[in-house]
Amino acid sequence: METYEYTHRGRGAQTFIYLGKLFRMFLFQNDWKVLPMSAIIAALVAFAVGANLFDTMEGTLMGTFALSCVCVWNGFFNSIQMICRERAIVKREHRAGLHITSYVAAHMIYQAILCILQVCITLFVCQFMKIKMPEKCLFTPWPAVDLGITLFLVTYCADMLALLVSAFSKTTTAAMTIMPFLLIVELLFSGSFFTLPDEAMPFTNLTATKWGLTAMCSQGDYNSLPMVSVWNNALKMKDVEVEGDKPLLTAFQYIEQNDMRDDFLMASAAQNQNPEFNYDAKIVLKCWAWLIIWTAVYVIAAIILLEFIDKDKR
């Protein structure tokens, strides 16, 4: 009786096989739709909050928060269904010799390329819509490249979190049910945009939005920008009368006549500076490091979950 020996391809070969499969799915299963969708989202955000981005404190905080949300949204939609939609296939092929590390590595490479394309699209849309970019750079000769690295790391971190959810979820419905909850957590625990109780602040370290927002505010030199909200709110009360006089109107006229408006805006900004947003390479590197750490945690967790996929009886 003849005996047959079965040989399995190595991890490297399997990685490229599955990478090819992913690119075929990109072309023929409409996975390419995430690219035009990212352009539309970037255009909407740029139109809504881009006017004062990297121009005023308030505009920078709001704009960087919005950009972080764009990155998280893109990352989530890239991979939230990637594994769960072929869970039965992965289980069968794992029993036949599939290396989970190769499978996840293929997804990592594919998603990294996808994230890079989305970041390039986002930056192009911002440039096309005349959104102001940071005037200085900390690491490369091009501010847009520095900003693009931050956008990529936030997008990729969110992407790998969604891949972990996809590895855990049995069905695409379950994965899509979990995604809005994670998105809300990312938005609420961004760290600086929403005022949170002190006991909740440590949880902001778990979100990609916190590190993305902090890095972009630092890159945009947040603490050197003027603050306009105090001036604008006070201006609304210029016609308020006190004993027949309009003291605020008189004060505004004096400030304008003596060309002191910019001094007022900068004095207001000086009272609202945030040391976490200092223009400092160490701050940006810290944010990048945290994003890389969380990305690695999500990848390792996904591999561990998929290694036990054969025992999954759900």
Image (cartoon, helix red, strand yellow):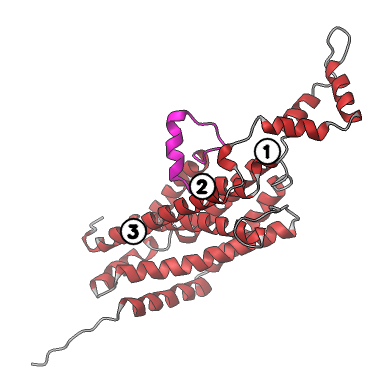
Quarter that holds the C terminus: bottom left
Residue that carries the numbered disc 1 in the rendered image: 58
Q: Residue reaching furthest bottom?
A: 2
Image point (68%, 62%), residue name: 124
Mark 1 surroundings: few (<14), some (14-19) or many (≥20) residues within 10 A: some
Which corner quadrant of the image does residue 192 belong to? Answer: top right
Residue 192 on the magenta span: yes
Earlier along the polypeptide chain: callout 2 or callout 3? Answer: 2
Residue that carries the numbered disc 2 in the rendered image: 211
Is residue 304 found left or right of 252 in the rendered image? left
Height in image: 270 above or below 221? above
One can see residue 170 in this view? no
Mark 2 surroundings: few (<14), some (14-19) or many (≥20) residues within 10 A: many
Q: Residue reaching furthest right?
A: 257
Which corner quadrant of the image does residue 93 belong to? Answer: bottom left
Height in image: 178 above or below 26? above
Residue 110 on the magenta span: no
Mark drawn on residue 300: 3
Q: Amino acid at mark 3?
A: Ile
Image point (85%, 19%), residue name: 239
SS of the residue under disc 1: helix
Q: Nearer the viewer, residue 76 or 177?
A: 76
Measure the alpha-carbon separation of dots 2 and 1.
18 Å
Q: Nearer the viewer, residue 10 or 175?
A: 10
Image point (43%, 37%), residue name: 202
Q: Which residues are magenta?
A: 189-208
Earlier along the polypeptide chain: callout 2 or callout 1? Answer: 1
Q: Amino acid at mark 2?
A: Trp
Measure the alpha-carbon separation of dots 1 and 3.
38 Å
SS of the residue under disc 2: helix
Q: Position of residue 133 (x, y in %)?
A: 70, 54
